[in-house]
Amino acid sequence: MSARTQGGGRSPPPGDIVAGDRRALAAAITLIESTLEEDREPAEALLQALLPHAGKAVRIGISGAPGVGKSTFIEAFGTRAIAAGRRLAVLAVDPSSERSGGSILGDKTRMAALARSERSFIRATPAGGALGGVARRTRDAMIACEAAGFDLVMVETVGVGQSEAAVADMVDLFMLLVQPGAGDELQGIKRGVMERADIVVVTKADGALEAAAAHAKADFEAALSLHAGAGPWTPCVIVCSSVEGTGLGEIADAVERHRAAMAGAGALEARRAAQARTWLWREVEESLMARLRADGRLAPAVEALEAEVTAQTLTPSAAARRIVTGILRADEGEGARPPPASPLPPEPETE
């Protein structure tokens, strides 16, 4: 975790970000990711100023099991996109160090060639314990990147699993990477992830693994057919080798066809609207939890309720309702009158 995330600092001018100043963009994302309460208001003001300049980029989410080659694929695919005239931003969410809270993999090291390009911007962010394989502020960081003129934004998740499907709620296209010999992996991948995938990419299709990649393609096409639903886009499976560069053109074509199909049917706008609603309520949940943890008046009562739930003398649902009611009553007690002695109301008696 950077010192800036731990401490306050000046908000970069929105005009510098819109003008494409990479340092200003980096400073903006650091402010956005800050966990300090004093940084929330300037971060929100900055995002509000950038919002009119965002929304035009192609947003792609990349997920896959550890070792599948996500970073290698992003570098190969991204380099090709830049050669075709794109400006690429990569938001790579790394596992967090339990000791420092910072990223422990370092995607700029793993994407060295891509990092050297003036037309790319790579930001590695520690997951920080956030569910969904993406950091809490990844969606906000996407807005800043789009406002800075990057027309292709790729979000690389920590790994793959049921919770990793959360990245699908912030991108236009969700790409799942799998590898040859993935019969066991197919069984292990959660159904929710398969249902959200728009494109499945079988990686490492070169050398001795080329035949296995073709077999895996057939397996995943069969799996996708079970989850195919009505809509303007039919999910597809593509075989590629990031090392040899094969299949990358087919994937790029599929991305363009997906966007055309979604936009033509009005589904892209509808998907983004639904995503905005989803993230609104996730932010409400996160904010309530932050409010609960920060209010010292509630701590003793919450600990007591937790002890009752643990002892199985109170149901979790009843305890949760009392905690939420306590937060509301504590807020009502701020300012005009002193807070109540016991913020959490007693459980009503039943006849």
Image (cartoon, rainbow, N blue to C red):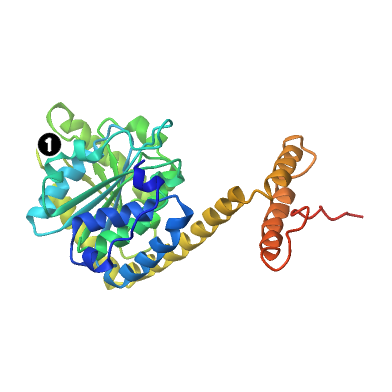
Can residue 134 be seen by looking at this rendering? no
- Is 51 left or right of 344, judged from the image as shown? left
Residue furthest to the top in view is 208
Mark 1 — residue? 243
x, y percent for residue 74: 20, 45
| Local SS, label 1 | loop
In-front residue for pair 90/297: 297
Residue furthest to the left in view is 83
x, y percent for residue 53: 27, 70
Q: Is residue 294 depicted above or below 268 in this figure?
A: above
- Is 81 left or right of 38, judged from the image as shown? left
Crowd tier of the residue under label 1, counting other residues whose Cα lies within 10 Å: few below 14, some 14–19, many 20 or above: some
Q: Is residue 190 depicted above or below 50 in this figure?
A: above
Residue lying at 18% horizontally and 29% vertically, measured from the top left: 209
- Amino acid residing under circle 1: Val
Q: For the C terminus, give its image quadrant.
A: bottom right
- Is 22 left or right of 159, judged from the image as shown? left
Q: Is residue 246 depicted above or below 29 in this figure?
A: above
- Is 320 left or right of 92, judged from the image as shown? right
Residue lying at 24% horizontally and 58% vertically, measured from the top left: 24
User: Looking at the rendering, which quadrant does residue 272 occupy?
Assistant: bottom left
x, y percent for residue 239: 19, 42
